Amino acid sequence: MSIQEIAISNNQKKHLLKAVQDESILFQDDNGDLVVNVAAYEASRTDKNPTPIEDIIGEDVLDYNAEYFVFS
């Protein structure tokens, strides 16, 4: 299992929780970190909102070879 850990601000966490409300894609673990299933996220992209996480975090931060992104 490959995981990419990314440090973000509390404000960015709030924006991510609002932007991605599907718990099969993004969920908050017990210690407050946000976990994203990369395969589910890529499958959920739509023409209406193709890059909600990138819009908040930035384009060049994410490594799509990882199975999960963990935002802390």
Image (cartoon, rainbow, N blue to C red):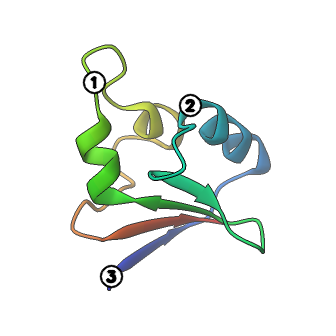
Q: Name the one closer to the observer, 20 or 11.
A: 20
Indicate whether 62 appears above or below 66.
above
Estimate how packed mark 3 is, as few (under 14), some (14 to 19) or many (20 or more) residues with alpha carbons within 10 Å: few
Please give left or right for residue 12 compared with residue 23 in the image: right
- Which residue is label 1 attached to? 46
Question: Which quadrant of the view contains residue 16?
Answer: top right
Q: Quadrant of the N terminus?
A: bottom left
Question: Which quadrant of the view contains residue 12?
Answer: top right
Q: Disc 2 residue type? A: Ala
- Which residue is label 3 attached to? 2
Q: Name the one closer to the observer, 34 or 59.
A: 34
Q: Name the one closer to the observer, 72 or 67.
A: 67
Question: Which quadrant of the view contains residue 17?
Answer: top right
Query: Residue at horizontal 47%, vertical 58%?
Result: 36
Q: Secondary structure at mark 1?
A: loop
Query: Residue at horizontal 29%, vertical 32%?
Result: 45
Residue 7 position, x and y percent, is 62, 64
Q: Secondary structure at mark 3?
A: loop
- Which residue is label 2 attached to? 19
Q: Secondary structure at mark 2?
A: helix
Please give left or right for residue 70 compared with residue 32 in the image: left
Residue 6 position, x and y percent, is 53, 65
Separation of disc 3 and disc 1 at Cα? 25 Å
Query: Residue at horizontal 26%, vertical 45%?
Result: 42
The tag on residue 35 is none
| Label 3 or label 1, whichever comes before in sequence order | 3
Q: Disc 3 residue type? A: Ser
